[in-house]
Amino acid sequence: MCGLAGEIRFDASPADAGALSAMAASMVPRGPDGAGLAVRGPTGLAHRRLKIIDLSEAGRQPMEDAELGLTLAFNGCIYNHRELRAELEGKGYRFFSTSDTEVILKAFHAWGPDCVNRFKGMFAFAIAERDSGRLTLARDRLGIKPLYYSELANGLRFASTLPALLAAGGVDRSIDPVALNHYFSFHAVVPPPRTLFAGVRKLPPATVMTVEPDGRRKQHQYWSPSYDPAPDEAKLTEQDWRERIEAALRAAVKRRLVADVPVGVLLSGGLDSSLIVALLAEAGAKGLNTFSIGFESVGGEAGDEFQYSDIIAERFGTAHHKIIVETKRALPALEGVVRAMSEPMTSHDCVGFYLLSEEVSKHVKVVQSGQGADEVFAGYHWYPPMAGANDPLAAYAAAFFDRDHAEMRETLDPRWQGADHALDYVREHFARPGASSPVDKALRIDSHVMLVDDPVKRVDNMTMAFGLEARTPFLDHELVELAARCPAALKTADGGKGVLKTIGRDVLPHEVIDRPKGYFPVPALKYLRGPYLELVRDAVTSKDFRDRGIMRGAYVDRLLADPEGQITPLRGSKLWQAGVLALWLAEHDGAAAQAARAA
């Protein structure tokens, strides 16, 4: 896991080494183990390295292969790199390292941009071709690894994080009105390619972009699984599906053990992370480190789920670490949390993942996490009711949207108002072929849009703030493809994740499976009180935020008057959502932030 950055100029001038260095410097936490810079005429790449595979200097980046004329900067992990290496050696390629990075280089030379179809893993990479001057950018199928880019007057810059682009300067930081509408209505999810800043875009998942030296570019989506059953699967029984999914999950968990350093597990005590621990133990993992976090209770709402994680740790004999965080510790951490956000994220558990990652990084460099199971296997409460919905769009919006269009008119200053962008986006997505049932329409948009720009981005940003690599077996693309075709009724059974629960009953204690659904509880950010309320109040009433003219003053005052009564359908705080936006803008675009970049 690492951070990459780069620049390509279209006017034959050399790439800006200073800008590249500034971008790399902003990503030191993502890659604390090494740095590299390669400028070759109009193209330059920079890198920060976290050593996971091939710990020697042979794996350093940017990686150059003079014989092939290729230079690569890469973030992620290719889990099947050994198998691909053997295949490439059979084609006559010679290797100078044992890294997965070099496998990408050779694979690109052998198969061109189509090499991405052979990779099993998470990745974002940039490859510069010496002879043609062409640049290729690519992102993995589920968008686990991020890649942002910004237009220059005569060029293009790109980086693993949005703040890295800001560090280089010259970015249009005006607010994108469509992105702003998504933020306040679509549960803070801003679908690609937009970001909150008009001058920054993000490469969509499962996408390859080719950039020519004169600036011409093209991009294509190389993966889009069908959510309709394949003809040869029509007669499969429930037991058939269970066996196929269980086999795919076992392979996904085992695949994510590929590393030259120990691998731990973030254990919440829920079904998903507990299954990972059980399958790892079954695969022979010994002395497995597991980690759980808990907060103080607020407003009668429990702040930990230790009773469940303790059961799993004892059952499978893990080396379990319980991290108990006093509420007062979360407050000073918020500054670092907001700084680590590439885009503003409103989920309360950002601070939980941040503090958990800080502690976990003291023990291991790699962890497996249960992210993605809810979106892939229908774990959320809005999926079962959609099975019989006459109007899937209305049913989904009622459950997921933070505000309807009428409340958006009350929320935003008139200059930011317009069409119901989020509803229009979901309507168009639901209409695409390949997902016939209402449940599968919701699962598809959640797995390929919401998941990418909420839970997955959250985990990447917070873990990488401490140089911790998070791997997500439930987002193994082969498992996702299989789950997509699995009949919706099997996924929504038993209150959701029915097929996973069936698998779990053979390996997990029933208390973990038949418990109420839990989340990463951080009550202090849901029930804003005391210093947390004052922090948010100061942010949303600051001159800087007011002068931006984003929100109507009367609406902000309404939120401040009753912060605990203004809760979204997904049980989030509307005031916290406004506060995160104000805090994020102050951190990344405020006067202090701009002065620091200028210095």
Image (cartoon, rainbow, N blue to C red):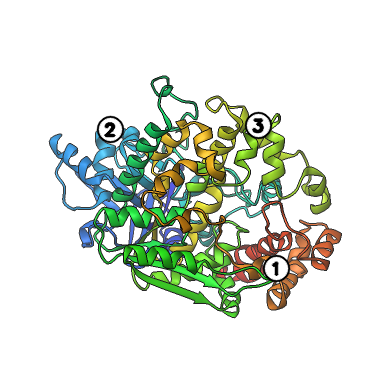
Real-space Cα separation, disc 2 to disc 1, in angstroms: 53 Å
The answer to whether residue 248 is above or below residue 286 is above
Give the residue at the far top of this rendering: 231
Instruction: State if disc 1 and disc 3 touch (CB < 8 Å).
Output: no
Q: CA distance from mark 2 to mark 3?
A: 45 Å
Residue at the spot x=47%, y=58% of the render?
Answer: 511
Residue 446 is at least partly visible in this image: yes
| Crowding near the residue tagged with mark 3, few <14, some 14–19, many ≥20 C-alpha atoms within 10 Å | few
Q: Residue at label 2?
A: 111
**Mark nearer the N terminus (3 vs 1):** 3
Label 3, label 1: how many angstroms apart (C-alpha)?
Answer: 34 Å
Q: Position of residue 343 (x, y in %)?
A: 58, 56
Q: Earlier in the sequence, mark 2 or mark 3?
A: 2
**Which residue carries the number 1 mark?**
527
Q: Amino acid at mark 2?
A: Trp
Residue 22 visible in this rendered orientation of the protein: no
The amino acid type of the residue labelled 3 equals Gly
- Residue 528, position as x, y percentages in the image: 71, 70
Alpha-carbon neighbours of circle 2 within 10 Å: few (<14), some, or many (≥20)?
A: few
Q: Residue 85: x, y in percent?
A: 19, 43
Kindly identify which residue carries mark 3. Answer: 388
Secondary structure of the residue carrying tag 1 is loop
